[in-house]
Image: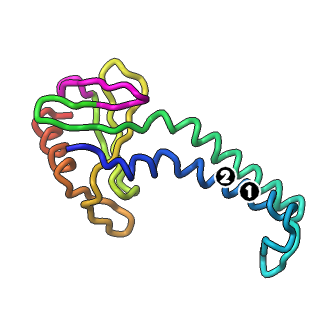
Amino acid sequence: MESNRTYHFIFKYIFLGAALIVIAVPLLSYIFPNAVELNGETGPTSLITTIAFGVTGVILLVFFFVVKDNFAIVQFGNQSITIKHNGQESVENWLDIDSISQFRFIFPPLYSLKIKGNKRPIWFNTDSNYVSVGGYTMDHSDMGNLITKKKRELGI
C-alpha cells in the first residue's frame, strides 16, 4: 500500500500554483489592461489591489517553501514503513513511530507521521476512498484501515 502520487504532487505544489496565479493577475493587468476584469470593470488594477494581490502571493509562496519538504510518499507493510522523502528512501519499523494522525478537514485524506528522534513531521496521503460529511473526512482506504489497526494494536 503506497501513497497516491497524484495527490502527493497536488498537495505539495498547490500553494506554489496559487501564489503564481495571485501574483500574475496584477502584473497582467498592467501589461494588458483590458484583459483583467475586477468588479465588472476592465482596466489596470489600482495600487491597493495590486499590493493586496502581491502580499497574498508572497505569503502563499513563503508558505509553500515552509511546508513543501514535509510531504513524502509512504509505503506501508505489516512490519515496516518505507518513506520516500526528498530523494531518499528509508525503512522504519512500526515501533519507531511516535505518532500518526489524520488531518480531519482535508480531503483526500492527509496524515501526519512523527518518527521518534525526528523533529519534523512527515505528511502523506492515502487513496481517495473516503467519506466527507460537513468537511469531516473519514478514511476508508486499505492504507487508512491498516493505520487504524496498527494505532490500536501499538497504542500510537
| Amino acid of disc 1 | Ala
95 in the magenta segment? yes
Check whether the beta carbons of the residues at disc 1 and disc 2 lie within 8 A of each other: yes
Please provide percent x and percent y for residue 95: 18, 25
**16 sits to left or right of 57:** left
The quarter of the picture where residue 115 lies is top left
**66 sits to left or right of 26:** left
55 in the magenta segment? no
Please provide percent x and percent y for residue 63: 59, 42
Query: Looking at the rendered structure, which numbered label has been put on residue 24?
Result: 1
**90 sits to left or right of 18:** left
Q: Quadrant of the C terminus?
A: top left
Which segment did they paint magenta? 83-97
Query: Looking at the rendered structure, which numbered label has been put on residue 56?
Result: none
Please provide percent x and percent y for residue 5: 35, 47
Q: CA distance from mark 1 to mark 2?
A: 6 Å
The quarter of the picture where residue 91 lies is top left
Mark 2 sits on what residue? 20
- What SS does tag 1 mark? helix
- What SS does tag 2 mark? helix
Q: Is residue 113 above or below residue 92?
A: below
Q: Look at 29% across and 59% down and name the residue there.
A: 128
